[in-house]
Image: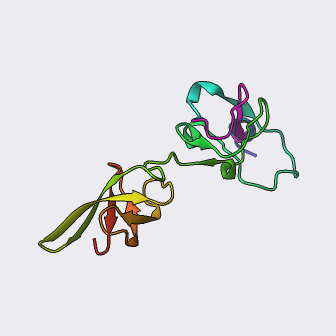
Amino acid sequence: MRFPRLRIFLLAAIMAAGAVCTAAAQEMAVVARHVIYPGETIDAGSLSEVTLRRSNRIFTTIARHPDEIAGKVAKRTLLPGKLIPVSSVREAYVVEAGSPVAVSYVHGGLEISTIGIPLQPGAVGDLVKVRNADSGSVFSGIVLADGSIRVGAI
C-alpha cells in the first residue's frame, strides 16, 4: 500500500458525495395554504412546498412544484396541508359556453370568418362544439390562445 492516505481521502469524498446526493434527492410536493374552492384560480401565493416523506400510499400523480399548478383552476376543493393531485386542477377556460366568439376557417388563400356561440367551455387547444350565430348549424373547432376558434384545415 503505497498511497493509504489517498485511499482514505477518496473513500471520504465518495461518502460525502453520497450524503449530499441523498439530501438533494428529497422529494418536494405542493400543498394549499388555505381552502381553495372548485372553480377558483390558483395563484402561487396560496401554495406551499413541503418535503415529501417516503410513503407507499401515494397512488396518483401529485404536484411537485408551484409552477405546475399556478394559474390553473381547481376542479374540486383543495384543503390546506393536503397534497394536490394533478388531476384536481385544469387549465383555465378561454371561451365560455354561450359567450359569442370569433370563428374562422382558413385554407390556403381562403378565409371565412363569422360569430359563433360555443356550446361548451374550452381551454387553449380544446376541441369544442360551436353553433353558427347566423345559420344555427353546429360544428367543431379548436380554441386558440386569443379566445377565437379555428375550424377545419389549419
Q: From the viewer's side, name the closer residue of 125 and 104.
A: 104
Residue occupying the point 79% across, 30% down: 81
Left-right relation of 59 to 147: right
In which quarter of the view is residue 80 placed?
Answer: top right
Q: Quadrant of the C terminus?
A: bottom left
Image height of 78 relative to 114, above or below: above
Percent across and percent down for residue 35 are: 73, 29
Task: Please provide the residue range marked out in magenta.
Answer: 25-41
Image height of 135 relative to 75, above or below: below
**Secondary structure that dominates the magenta span:** loop
Residue that sits furthest to the front in the current view: 135
Image height of 13 relative to 149, above or below: above
Q: From the viewer's side, name the closer residue of 131 and 111.
A: 131
Residue 130 in sight here: yes
- Magenta stretch holds residue 31: yes
Left-right relation of 53 to 69: right
Percent across and percent down for residue 129 are: 45, 66
Q: From the viewer's side, name the closer residue of 146 and 47.
A: 146
Residue occupying the point 83% across, 39% down: 53
Percent across and percent down for residue 146 are: 32, 48
Q: How many marks?
A: 0
Q: From the viewer's side, name the closer residue of 31 and 56.
A: 31
- Magenta stretch holds residue 20: no
Residue occupying the point 35% across, 50% down: 147
Left-right relation of 25 to 69: right
